[in-house]
Amino acid sequence: MDGQNLSSQTILERLQKTVTRYGHGDKAELRRFQKTAFGEHVWQRDEAYNRWLFEEVPGADEDGPHIWICKRQDQIVGQQCGIPFRLKADDRLVQASWANSLMVLPEWRMRGAFIPLSAAQVASRPLVMGIHVSDAAFKAYMKAGWINVGALSTYIFPMDARRCVEASSVQGRLATAAGLAGPLLHAAAATFHQTARLTGARMEETAAFDERSDTIWRMASPHYPVMAMRDLSYLRWRFDAIPCASAYRRFYLMKGSTPLGYMVLRRETWRKEPCMAIVDYLCEPKWLWVMLAHALRIAREDEVTAVICRTLNTRSARTFMTLGLVRAPENWGFPVRVMAHVGAAAEAHRPLVADSRNWLLTMGDGDASFLMHNILPDEGDGVAADADGVIPEGLSGAIG
């Protein structure tokens, strides 16, 4: 080993010693760091969210939460968190983790805190994923050898075309065309719903997920080569146990007594317009158009301006388009990028993971949705908004 490599290794080892696994004795100091780094009214400082996300998550480590802290001069200057999950890769389940809430204080950036923090989380699982990756993190991850899986597509159905265009500040011929298209879109949605009813499948709302979820997982998962496991334990944790659980509506697609799929909806606001977000879904591909048709009917009854779904599901892109959900240009809104770090233990799955055509991803994966704007709900409303009134689940900048 030459002197330069030895020197680099020595520096890296020294940096790694500044990163340790979080312990409960670090809580008070970590909350102070988070207040400085993220702000006052954010989920990172909320004990209910922290308990739910890091302690109650299925597959949590006996060693404690997936939180690593970096200390310099006897104070916390950075953190890296992870959300453990199981990834289905063909017929195998891989232990994985979603990278979450990497933050370094501004005065300590570019001073060797990012690399050891990320390395500690990467070492925790054979496969580590990132979703909703910022521009800065994207560049850093690419340099560190991560795979760019791609970005979630944004599909929009304008329930009220004129109001959608007005909210987007679009004028002229496009606004006129939107007004003319409105009645056609309503007629199309009604036709889709009537056709869906002929299949004998119906949407049944439920207050909480139940054992039907495992039946759906067994039936639907073989159709998607790569996806995060969505069994009952995951769904109960992700949507029923989350502190803002009342913000979600859960539906099963049923035919007789047979469950065919599930869908999670959430009513939100975009530029003061009410919208319906399809947060998560799972079914065999042949039933997706039926679920979408029912979702449009629910949205019409709720009198929303638009239905939006952000998802990576190239195998069903034609289904979304056929149902009238227009795919927004890639440069609209903040891209929900997906990245992966494949460790040696998961190397055999690299080709599968690297191909975006194999994936089913939604805003229900990782921290893509509930952390999107980082603001806790106002007491009693169950919905979080940023300063512009934009709500999580992928609506930010999606229209216009």
Image: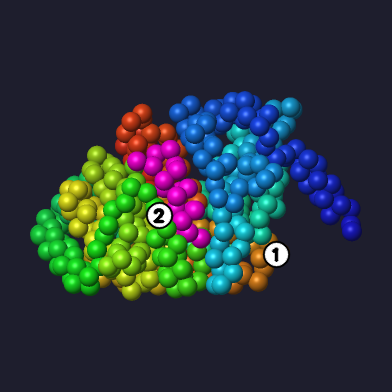
Magenta-tinted stretch? 229-246
Give how far apart the Cα atoms at labels 2 and 1 are.
Answer: 34 Å
State left or right for residue 325 relative to residue 366: left
Mainly helix, strand or loop, the magenta region? helix
Q: How many marks?
A: 2
Q: Position of residue 171 (x, y in %)?
A: 17, 50
- Report if residue 113 lies within the magenta region: no
State the residue at coordinates (56%, 55%).
85
Q: Residue at x 89, y 58 (%)?
A: 1
- Other residues around mark 2 within 10 Å, as few (<14) / some (14–19) / many (≥20): some
Q: Position of residue 254 (x, y in %)?
A: 29, 64
Residue labelled with disc 1: 345
* Element marked by disc 2: loop
> Which residue bears the numbered disc 2?
210
Image vertical order of residue 13 relative to residue 26, above or below: below
Q: Residue at x 30, y 63 (%)?
A: 253
The amino acid type, in three-letter code, at marker 2 is: Asp
Q: Tell me if residue 230 is in the magenta stretch.
A: yes
Local SS, label 1: helix
Q: Nearer the viewer, residue 279 or 154?
A: 279
Taking the image as drawn, is residue 90 in sight?
Answer: yes
In the displayed structure, would residue 77 be above or below residue 322?
A: above
Q: Amino acid at mark 1?
A: Ala
Q: Are marks 2 and 1 in contact (CB under 8 Å)?
A: no
